[in-house]
Image (cartoon, rainbow, N blue to C red):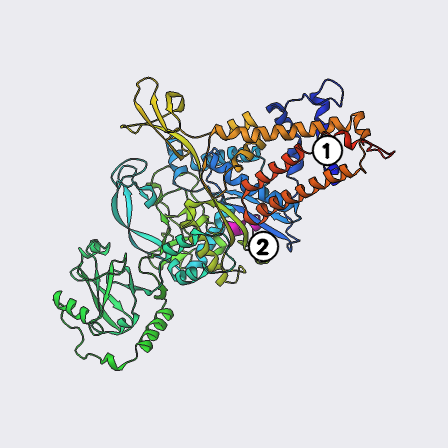
Amino acid sequence: MQILSQLKSLKRFTDLYKRRWVSRSCTDVKDVELTKELKHCIEKHWCKYLNQKQFNDTALGNKFYVLSMFPYPSGNLHMGHVRVYTISDAIARFQRMCGKNVFHPMGWDAFGLPAENAAIQRGIEPKVWTERNIAQMKQQVTDLGCSFDWSHELNTCSLEYYKWTQKLFLMLYNEGMAYQNEALVNWDPVDKTVLADEQVDDNGCSWRSGAKVEKRLLKQWFIKSTAYAKQLLEGLDDCTLKDWRDIINLQRHWIGECNGYSFQLLTSGSNYLRVWTAQPEHFKDPNAFVVLKTEHYLGKVAQDEVHMTVENPFTGTIMPLIFSNEPAFPEKCDVYLAAPNFREEDKELQRSLSLSFFADNELNFESLKVVDLRNDVLETAGRLKLGGYSVSSKLQDWLISRQRYWGTPIPIIHCDKCGAVPVPDSQLPVRLPEKSAFKSAVKDILECSCPKCGNTAARPETDTMDTFFDSSWYYLRYLDANNKHEMFDKRLAHQCMPVDLYIGGKEHAVLHLYYARFINHFLHSQGLVPTQEPFSRLLVQGMVMGRSYRVKGSGRYVQEHEVEIVNAKRNQAIMKETKEPVVISWEKMSKSKMNGVDPTDMFREYGTDTTRLIILADVAPTSHRNWSNATFPGILNWQKRLWRMVNEFCDLRSSPESCKIDINSIEFKAEEDKLFDARNFYIKGVTFNYRHAYQLSVAISKMQGLTNSLKYSELRNPPRSLAKNTNDLWQPN
């Protein structure tokens, strides 16, 4: 009877369309075909009912925060977007149906170099270009049918967002966690701009102009992310982290073994030098000196000085800086602290470099306790804010400076009298100029008043922040996106964090996750968030791959219609016109590889629901998905089977033959018991894969299994053994 009750609800659904699509009697629906037009009609009807329930921030005891990594607004969705947002939306809908108070927000990672370059090419402002793209992509996401909570929408390039990004920077600055220092950067001599490392190809050329990238020494802004290195490493063992799998190892590898200590010491050239050592007690050696690799960036500065030195605040002495590749430098480290009174090999190094002893009265270090010396050095470093935290030799501080217009302005004023002065909170946000003019010279004429002394010839900082800084805290702003007085409500954060499920691509598994974890650890130390780790559960979805065709020899990508398949199983093909051999392979979808699929075309041809089912079916969310038309028939046929089954049920319920079924017969009850067991088996499997394993492809296969059980049930085509023998009738409603 329970199966029949469920089918009755399906009957009401079907009745909505019988009147529109069937010109015959209301009950004769057997020949109605599930066309794409009918699919669009069904989707149009249900869209107004599906996304009405929103997050209730006053009843947070039953919250479920599901978050997908927000997109860069390029203007068009690609199939990778379709996959990640379909996954998050399916899980959000399931949790709502289970009674959870689901928070499922969406926003835009809107700053960055691509938008600026695209705007330059088109002769428009980056703001205009970005806002157009956001409007277009938002419509596409809406067409995808996602149940996002648009009342919490954010945009990283809006004043309402980057005001608080600047506030976060100032919080770090006031805690001694932000500083400016000389650093080598990648310089594009054609575009005359600084490039991030990821914008330089394997041949050392600019990804955009193709020019050979130069190294230039510029003052840059850094965040002392390494101060939290050990804490971030230990946080990977947090029992709240679930399903991080190999991401744990990627993060461990990036952070490295925290088997030493990092210090920031001032050089005679007024630069900060990072000195890493596994034995901080070596700073107590009055004859200690520092050796830099010959390619170290300070080598350029040293050309202007006869002798470079660095302060040793732990002995009150001055250490010489020597450029040499002779010492055994620590892993990926270009600085070596030598202590001749502690290490015999350093004494030999001192002799080989023709360095005399600097202190006449050598201490008897053998009589001193190493632990006491080490603790004294670390205590002094902490008190003077010179570092002294545990970190690996390879991990560097986070360089956030970008010499570009389209980014969050760094809220610092440079004054000839006061130096670098933070902008007061009351003067935030520091706004971007309304017109970029696409020229760096426009920044040189900007002047402002010093907040500290009132000097009117002060200059605002012209660097903007790395976009990783914008995305390092967006998951918190989502909770309180319209708050005009704070970054976010502390009460909300303590009740809603951490994120229950975070979904995104593996390309962000190292840097973005590392920076987001660092910021959350910092905010936890300030008492603003309840946990150190921001994301409990992680679902790293695989890429959507398209079949690409590349001419063998030249490597030129061509379109599928230009190719003749010779042997599909062996991936053998030739060009139709030239008969040149073609290499077939599966690669990440890309316009340049001519293997992309426009989601809008999919929506138009198959419908949104079908597209979503196809992207979820057959392949686990964590695996790469080879997008091929060959996989479509399975889903299309399943939809047709469901449609026919509901129509047949409606037809049967309206038939006079239904009155002849004895629902109290032994045979009827036995058949219903089979369906009861099948329903429980498949629903249990679906629930497990939606709630725990997140193997949505398995959940869909379970639903298909239930369809088959219903299809082959004798209740659909009852034999004569079920005919009524009593006056009890199965009366259709």
Instruction: Inspect this view and state whether residue 480 appears.
Output: no
**Mark in front: 2 vs 1:** 1
Which residue lies most toward the bottom here?
Answer: 367
- Across and down, in percent, residue 725 comes to 84, 33
**As drawn, 433 above or below 492:** above
Q: Dots 2 and 1: beta carbons under 8 Å?
A: no
Residue 425 seen: yes
The local secondary structure at tag 1 comes to: loop
Indicate yes or no whether the magenta region holds residue 377.
Answer: no
Task: Write down the residue under mark 1.
Answer: 715
Quarter of the figure that contains the N terminus: top right
Question: Please, which residue is most extreme toward the right here?
Answer: 727
Q: Position of residue 312 (x, y in %)?
A: 26, 69
Magenta residue span: 474-485
Mark 1 is surrounded, within 10 Å at the Cα level, by few (under 14), some (14 to 19) or many (20 or more) other residues, namely some
Amino acid bearing label 1 = Leu
Q: State the image coordinates of residue 386 (x, y, percent, origin top left).
A: 34, 66
Where residue 627 is drawn, which disc sits there?
Answer: none
Q: Which residue is mark 2?
A: 496
